Image: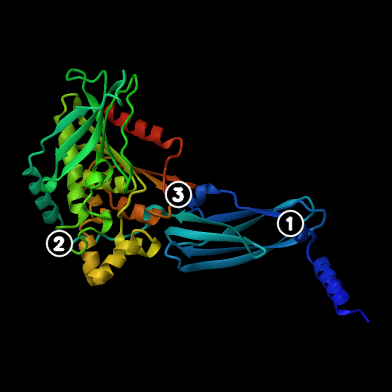
């Protein structure tokens, strides 16, 4: 009779021999290739493909599974397929999906082990997120604009000689905005720009907490660029009195951080319009994340902007947004609890600052960039505002980008978009 040690060894060997050879040797490889840029429009059907490769010397039978959930993590589908793969061969497994318009989180697993989790989209322009603007929305923002108009801007420019070169000059700009708050920015003026040789201007709106930066002048530069730092951020952060901007003044629409910040955007347009070198027919705007939200809001409130290219815009569709992401939901909901604000009062207040409630008022052409894998400003929220724009518009989805669209071609696409308008 075998002793316990020998019995264990025999049982272990029998178990190992019962396993597929490829699994024993780790010879099965699962790969999820990007297919159709991972987004589709009708009548196409969303399809997820998985390649299974067996580099072993024996055949293998593998199990491939796919689970699908909404971007709010609500289960949608779960499916599984078995596939036999000959030694040294590969096979493809395809899952065809029947989905409603929206964005979805897919997880592929091979033999129970997660292979890849990623987002896909279907009919993004059919996503419906109705505006929830309050009846006095327009009045609220007109009053803010009227208050801004009463503030003397006191524009000042100081050349930053260490940033200037033969391609142009860089200036530190200071100005007074709503409430008499001083905000700053960097202005870059090409050497060839003058009162007689006016140029288009591009206003850059910055992301949340972005560090100060300026457009580097270069020979042949053919547009003026202004990078704005809104109150408490960027160049103004050393004197920030707002703390975490997104929760400052929460619960009071007249004190909330973004009432003043949105007016800073308009003051920036006021500023560039005073420059003799600017061709005021061609004022463009761009920005990403918070800067994308700023870009859309500025276009809504100021018709002097002739075209804009926001990307991965922030502050869109708060009620859905907070069900999808952890930030800024967590600090806002924590502050809500501290202040004892009800859900209805919170979302009513935030509706005055929700980008989707501004976008219907945009009249200029818009090109928007989207990162399909964005965990911070998910594509669902991007389209909540975009789908309400009634002016000329287009979008570009970068299927592998997360919270960015710094795809090699985005800057060139943006430049071509603006230059086409100057030639119309």
C-alpha gap between disc 2 and disc 3: 36 Å
Q: Tag 2's secondary structure?
A: loop
Q: Tag 1's secondary structure?
A: loop
Tell me which numbered mark, 2 or 3, is placed earlier along the sequence. Answer: 2
Where residue 137 appears, x then y in whole percent? 16, 57
Q: Which residue is mark 3?
A: 402
Figure check: 253 above or below 287:
below
Query: How many other residues sit within 10 Å of disc 1, few (<14), some (14-19) or many (≥20)?
Result: few
Where residue 105 appears, x then y in whole percent? 49, 60
Q: Nearer the viewer, residue 110 or 149?
A: 149
Front disc: 1 or 2: 1
> What label does residue 26 carry, if any?
1
**Could you tell whether 116 is left or right of 40 in the image?**
right
Q: Tag 3's secondary structure?
A: loop
**Could you tell whether 61 is left or right of 379 in the image?**
right
Q: Which residue is mark 2?
A: 135
Circles 1 and 2, Cβ within 8 Å, touching? The answer is no
For the C terminus, the quadrant is top left
Residue name at image x 25 percent, y 50 percent: 359
Q: Nearer the viewer, residue 123 or 249?
A: 249
Number of marks drawn: 3
Figure check: 355 above or below 200:
below
C-alpha gap between disc 1 and disc 3: 31 Å
Where residue 334 appears, x then y in whole percent? 31, 67
């Amino acid at each position: 009779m075998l002793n316990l040690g020998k019995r264990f060894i025999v049982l272990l060997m029998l178990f190992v021999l019962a396993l597929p050879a490829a699994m024993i040797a780790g010879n099965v490889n699962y790969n999820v290739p990007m297919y159709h840029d991972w987004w589709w429009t009708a009548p196409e059907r969303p399809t997820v493909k998985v390649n299974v490769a067996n580099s072993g010397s024996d055949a293998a039978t593998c199990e491939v599974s796919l689970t699908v959930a909404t971007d709010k993590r609500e289960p949608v589908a779960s499916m599984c397929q078995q596939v036999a793969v000959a030694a040294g061969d590969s096979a493809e497994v395809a899952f065809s999906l029947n989905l409603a318009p929206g964005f979805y989180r897919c997880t592929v697993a091979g033999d129970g082990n997660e292979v890849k989790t990623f987002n896909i989209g279907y009919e993004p322009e059919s996503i419906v997120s109705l505006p929830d603007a309050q009846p006095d929305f327009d009045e609220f923002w007109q009053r803010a604009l009227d208050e801004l108009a009463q503030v003397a801007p006191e524009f000042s420019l100081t050349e930053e000689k260490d940033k200037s070169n033969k391609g142009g000059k860089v200036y530190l700009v200071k100005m007074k905005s709503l409430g008499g708050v001083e905000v700053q920015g960097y202005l870059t003026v090409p050497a060839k720009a003058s009162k007689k040789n006016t140029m288009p201007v591009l206003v850059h709106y910055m992301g949340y907490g972005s560090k100060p930066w300026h457009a580097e002048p270069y020979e042949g530069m053919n547009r003026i660029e202004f990078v704005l730092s809104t109150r408490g951020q960027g160049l103004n952060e050393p004197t920030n009195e707002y703390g975490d901007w997104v929760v400052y003044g929460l619960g009071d629409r007249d004190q909330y951080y973004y009432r003043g910040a949105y007016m800073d955007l308009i003051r920036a347009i006021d500023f560039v319009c005073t420059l003799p070198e600017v061709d005021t027919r061609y004022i463009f705007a761009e920005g990403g994340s918070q800067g994308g939200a700023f870009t859309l809001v500025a276009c809504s409130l100021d018709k002097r902007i002739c075209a804009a290219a926001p990307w991965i815009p922030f502050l869109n569709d708060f009620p859905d947004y907070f069900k999808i992401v952890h930030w800024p939901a967590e600090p806002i909901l924590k502050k809500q609890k501290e202040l004892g604000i009800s859900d209805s009062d919170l979302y009513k207040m935030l509706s005055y600052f929700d980008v989707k409630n501004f976008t219907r008022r945009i009249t200029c052409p818009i090109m928007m960039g989207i990162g399909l894998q964005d965990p911070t400003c998910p594509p669902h929220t991007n389209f909540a505002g975009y789908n309400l724009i009634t002016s000329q518009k287009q979008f570009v989805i970068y299927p592998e980008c997360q919270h960015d669209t710094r795809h090699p071609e985005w800057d060139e696409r943006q430049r071509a978009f603006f230059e086409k308008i100057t030639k119309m």
